[in-house]
Image (spheres, rainbow, N blue to C red):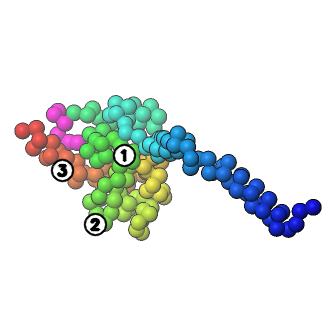
């Protein structure tokens, strides 16, 4: 018959042994830690995507039913105005995870369409009008459904005027670099 002290030690040993099997062995194996690191990085990267311009145009047309006239060819040389894919190129470089300084003081632009947190999405950093009814963080993933819904809402309410100042700046920069 064991005394209380021996039973307590047995319980402590069992707890130690189970923790060692579940957690402790990970600490001693560099290969297992490397696997965990690779899986973690893969999960982070899998949440965002950098599109090719043709891939994005095709997805907007086929999956989200954007009219072809709203996805003009990407050619600054022939177009006087930067719209559609050209605008996405200059705003986010086709990166769904892009976050940049907004035109409005202390604001940020989120996602592939660079939607501003002052008016359109709920910022984790400051108050917002949140007219699209969406968290800005959701605009940074590879699922474009909510981004497109917000984009369509913005276009209905304001047209492309939310992005025009950036587009004109991008056009001027393009002309200066091509000289």
**Marked residue nearer the N-terminal end (2 or 3):** 2
Residue for point 47% across, 34% down: 63
Q: Which class describes the residues within 10 Å of circle 2: few (<14), some (14-19), or many (20+)?
A: few
Secondary element under disc 3, as helix, strand or loop, is helix
Q: Nearer the viewer, residue 178 or 134?
A: 178
Q: Is 74 positioned to the left or the right of 139 in the image?
A: left
Q: Which class describes the residues within 10 Å of circle 3: few (<14), some (14-19), or many (20+)?
A: few
Q: Which class describes the residues within 10 Å of circle 1: few (<14), some (14-19), or many (20+)?
A: many
Secondary element under disc 1, as helix, strand or loop, is loop
Q: Which residue is mark 1?
A: 112
Q: Are marks 2 and 1 in contact (CB under 8 Å)?
A: no
Q: Which residue is mark 2?
A: 105
Q: Answer whether residue 126 is magenta in the image.
A: no
**Marked residue nearer the N-terminal end (1 or 3):** 1
Q: Quadrant of residue 64?
A: top left
Looking at the rendering, the stretch of residues picked out in magenta corresponds to 76-82
Q: Label 2 to label 1, Cα distance in Å?
A: 20 Å
Secondary element under disc 2, as helix, strand or loop, is loop
Q: Label 1 to label 3, Cα distance in Å?
A: 18 Å
């Amino acid at each position: 018959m064991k005394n209380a002290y021996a039973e307590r030690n047995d319980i402590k040993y069992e707890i130690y042994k189970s923790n060692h099997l579940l957690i402790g062995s990970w600490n001693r194996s560099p290969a297992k830690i490397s696997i965990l690191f690779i899986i973690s990085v893969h999960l982070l990267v899998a949440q965002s995507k950098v599109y090719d311009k043709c891939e994005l145009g095709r997805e907007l047309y086929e999956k989200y039913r954007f009219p072809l006239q709203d996805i003009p060819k990407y050619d600054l040389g022939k177009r006087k105005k930067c719209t559609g894919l050209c605008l996405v190129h200059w705003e986010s470089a086709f990166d769904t995870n892009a976050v940049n300084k907004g035109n409005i003081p202390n604001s940020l632009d989120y996602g592939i369409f660079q939607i501003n947190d002052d008016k359109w999405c709920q910022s984790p950093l400051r108050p917002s009008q949140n007219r699209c009814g969406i968290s800005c963080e959701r605009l940074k993933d590879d699922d474009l459904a909510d981004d497109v819904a917000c984009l369509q809402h913005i276009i209905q309410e304001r047209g492309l005027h939310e992005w025009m100042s950036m587009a004109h700046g991008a056009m001027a920069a393009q002309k200066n670099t091509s000289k």
